[in-house]
Image (cartoon, coloured by chain):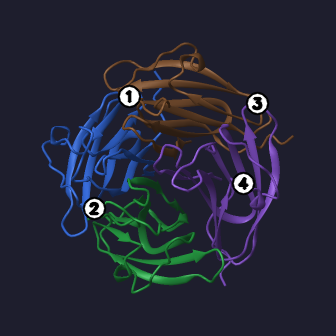
Chain colours: A purple, B brown, C green, D blue
Amino acid sequence: MNDEAGGRRHWYVPDAYLPGDSSHGVESHESACLLNAGSRPAVVSLTFFFEDRDPVGPVEVTVESRRTRHVRLTDPAQLSGVVLPRDVPFAYKAECDVPIVLQHSRLDTSAGAYTLGTTIAYGE
Amino acid sequence: MNDEAGGRRHWYVPDAYLPGDSSHGVESHESACLLNAGSRPAVVSLTFFFEDRDPVGPVEVTVESRRTRHVRLTDPAQLSGVVLPRDVPFAYKAECDVPIVLQHSRLDTSAGAYTLGTTIAYGE
Amino acid sequence: MNDEAGGRRHWYVPDAYLPGDSSHGVESHESACLLNAGSRPAVVSLTFFFEDRDPVGPVEVTVESRRTRHVRLTDPAQLSGVVLPRDVPFAYKAECDVPIVLQHSRLDTSAGAYTLGTTIAYGE
Amino acid sequence: MNDEAGGRRHWYVPDAYLPGDSSHGVESHESACLLNAGSRPAVVSLTFFFEDRDPVGPVEVTVESRRTRHVRLTDPAQLSGVVLPRDVPFAYKAECDVPIVLQHSRLDTSAGAYTLGTTIAYGE
C-alpha cells in the first residue's frame, strides 16, 4: 500500500446553507464529501461557523482508508447528534490527521425542481 | 486561541452577475460568502470591476473572529450603500488584513425555478 | 511543439453520484472532462472509491495530445467495461503520466428539469 | 497604480459545451469571464481543443486594465469570427501576457428552465 495519498489536512467551506423547503420527495440537503485515498483511516474534525453565534464543534467523522464518505449535513446521526439549523447561513472547516480531499455540494429542491451547486473546498 | 487560521488575503471572482428578474418570491441574488476562522476580526475591502467603466470601491465589510458572513451583493445596506447594477456583467476582488476564505454563489430565480452556481474564489 | 503544457498528474473528485432517474430524453450522467494540452498522449488511470466496499480500478483512458476527452461515467464502453452503480455515493482519483487538467460535471435530469454542477477537481 | 495585481498567466477549462437548444428567449451559452485587476491591458490568447480534431486558435481577446470581460463563447464577434460548434464537447486554455483570473460559466436553458454551472478555471 502506498501512504503517499494526495490531499490536504485543512479544508474550508464558506457557503453552507440548508434550505428549509423541499419538493419531489427529495430533501434539500448539503453534503461534505470526503475522499480518503490513502492507506490509513482518517479522523476528520468538523467545526461549524455562524454569523451571530459561537462555532459548534468539533464533530468527529471517520473515513476508512481507501473509502469515500458523503456526510449529509442534514442528518444529526452523521454528526454526533448535532442538529444544524435550516434557513441560516453558515460555514465550516474540516481538519484531519491525514491528507484527504473535501468537495461540498448542495441540492436544493425547494422551488419544485432540483438545483445543484458543487465546489472543491479551499484546502491547505 | 489559535491565530494560525487558514486562508488567503486576496480573492478574485471574475463572474458576478445579478439577474434582473426573479420568481417564487425569492430574489435572484449573489453572495460573497466570507469565513473568518481565526481569532482576530477581519476587515475586507471589496472592489467591483466592470466591462466599460471604472471600478467601484473599496467597500469595507467586517467579519468578526470565528464567524462567517454571507454578504448579499443585492443589498446596498451590506455594501456601505453601494448599489450594484442588475443585468450587467461585473467582477470583484476582496482584500483582507488577515487570512479568510471566500466562496461566491449565485441563485438565479429568473426562469421560474431556482438555479444555483457556486465556486471557491481564486485566492492568493 | 511545446512540451511545457500545464496541469497536474494527480486529480481527486470526492463527490461523484449517478442519479438513477432521468427525464427529457436526456440521461442523468457525470463526466470526467480531461484536457491534454501537451504534445504527448496521456494515459490516465481512474480509480473509483465507495463508502462500503473496496475501490474499483484502475481503469485506463487515453487522451491524445492536444485533445480533450469528456469521459462519461455512465458509459461502460468508455471505462473498459466497468459499470458504475447508480444512486450510490462514490468518488474517484485520476493519475496520469503527463500533466493534464480534470474538471468534473454532473447533469441531473431526474426531477423533470436539468441541473448542472461542475468544478475543477483537486489537483497536485 | 499598483502593478502587483493577482492572478495567473495560464488557465485551463476542460469542460466546455454549448447546448444546441434554448428556451425562455435566453440562449444557452458559456462565458469565459476574465478579470484584469492590474494596471496594464491584458492580451489573452484562447485556444480551443476538441475530441477528434486539431485545436482552433489562438484567438486574441483584450481586457483593459482594471476591467472585466465576460467573453461569450457563442458569439463569433467576440472571437475574431471563430464559430464554435454546438452540441460538441470541447475545452480551452487561455494564455495571457499579464496575470488575470478566469472563471468559466455555462447557462443551459435547453430543458425549459435555467441551469447554471460555474468554476474558477485551473490556473498556473
Q: Which residue in the structure is indicated by mark 4?
A: A94
Rendered location of residue D50, percent (x, y):
24, 63
User: Residues under labels 1 and 2: Cα distance?
Assistant: 30 Å
Q: Label 4: state its secondary structure.
A: strand
The amino acid at mark 3 is Asp
User: Residues under labels 4 and 2: Cα distance?
Assistant: 35 Å
Say which mark, if any, is on residue B4: none
Classify C37 as above or below D118: below
User: Residues under labels 1 and 4: Cα distance?
Assistant: 37 Å
User: Residues under labels 2 and 3: Cα distance?
Assistant: 45 Å
Mark positioned earlier in the residue sequence (3 or 4): 3
Q: Say if mark 3 contacts mark 4, CB within 8 Å.
A: no
Q: Which residue in the structure is indicated by mark 2?
A: D89
Parent chain of label 4 = A
Binning the other alpha carbons within 10 Å of mark 4 as few (below 14), some (14 to 19) or many (20 upward) gives many
Parent chain of label 2 = D
Q: Are marks 3 and 4 on the same chain?
A: yes
- Residue located at (27% from left, 46% from top): D28
Q: Say if mark 1 contacts mark 2, CB within 8 Å.
A: no
Q: Say if mark 2 contacts mark 3, CB within 8 Å.
A: no
Q: Label 2: state its secondary structure.
A: loop
Q: Residue furthest top?
A: B81
User: Residues under labels 1 and 3: Cα distance?
Assistant: 30 Å
Q: Which residue in the structure is indicated by mark 1?
A: B21
The amino acid at mark 4 is Ala
